[in-house]
């Protein structure tokens, strides 16, 4: 099966963006980490990043139409986008909500997520390693095909 890893606004700036919060790993390195983890587990992982909400909605619709599992870091949209939440509600395969930082240790406005109620599970505060854990969990859920 195929897993989509979808990253929202400002995550393309990983590595230079507030490294004390998000770490030193760049988005390109994060892509490598995800693809490599998938390869080890025999699943195809596709990583995308956008700063445009409409593009993210189209990707979520694609995941809904194809029944694809998703790892979603909706970044700031997490805290205010009902449109992203409504797109998540259309997914049929598992959805993992992921945040690099522990959003509960930060500003008050980061404590609420519009996504969590629609997510199968949530990973917070484990840095970019969280992506590998999410992919591993999704790979374990995938029903084994014929030998
Ligand atoms: C984030 C947390 C959000 O609050 C923030 O807006 C981000 C990144 C994280 O991965 O920790 O852009 O989703």
Image (spheres, rainbow, N blue to C red):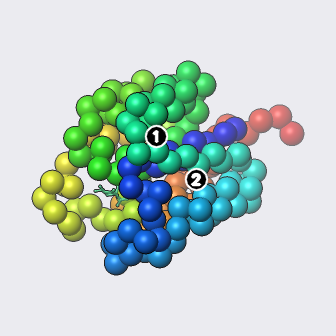
* Residue where numbered disc 2 is placed: 135
Looking at the rendered image, the quarter that the C terminus falls into is: top right
Disc 1 under 8 Å from ligand 1? The reply is no
Task: Name which residue lies at 38% across and 36% down.
Answer: 53
| Disc 1, SS | strand
Instruction: Give above or below for 1 relative to 134.
Output: above
Q: Residue furthest top?
A: 65
Residue 27 as seen in the image, left or right of residue 117: right
- Rendered location of residue 131, percent (x, y): 52, 58
Label annotation for residue 95: 1
| Disc 2, SS | helix
Instruction: Give above or below for 36 relative to 53.
Output: below
Task: Name which residue lies at 21% across and 55% down.
Answer: 110
**Which quarter of the rendered image does ligand 1 occupy?**
bottom left
Q: Can residue 45 be seen by looking at this rendering? A: yes
- Rendered location of residue 36, percent (x, y): 70, 61
Q: Residue furthest left?
A: 108
- Rendered location of residue 77, percent (x, y): 30, 44
Instruction: Give above or below for 86 relative to 47.
Output: above
Label annotation for residue 27: none
Task: Name which residue lies at 60% across and 66% down.
Answer: 29
Residue at mark 1 to residue at mark 2: CA–CA distance: 11 Å
Disc 2 under 8 Å from ligand 1? The reply is no
Question: Residue 30 or 121: which is nearer the viewer?
Answer: 30
Q: How many residues crowd mark 1 within 10 Å: few (<14), some (14–19), many (20+)? A: many
Task: Name which residue lies at 55% across and 46% down.
Answer: 48
């Amino acid at each position: 099966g195929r897993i989509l890893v979808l990253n929202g606004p400002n995550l393309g700036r990983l590595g230079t963006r507030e490294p004390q919060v998000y770490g030193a790993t760049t988005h390109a390195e994060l892509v490598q980490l995800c693809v490599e983890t998938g390869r080890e587990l025999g699943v195809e992982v596709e990583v995308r990043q956008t700063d445009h909400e409409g593009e993210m909605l189209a990707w979520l619709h694609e995941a809904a139409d194809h029944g694809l599992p998703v790892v979603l870091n909706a970044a700031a949209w997490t805290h205010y986008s009902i449109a992203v939440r409504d797109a998540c509600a259309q997914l049929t395969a598992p959805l993992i909500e992921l945040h690099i930082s522990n959003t509960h240790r930060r500003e008050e406005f980061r404590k609420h997520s519009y996504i969590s109620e629609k997510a199968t599970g949530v990973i917070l505060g484990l840095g970019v390693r969280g992506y590998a854990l999410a992919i591993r969990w999704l790979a374990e859920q995938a029903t084994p095909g014929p030998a």
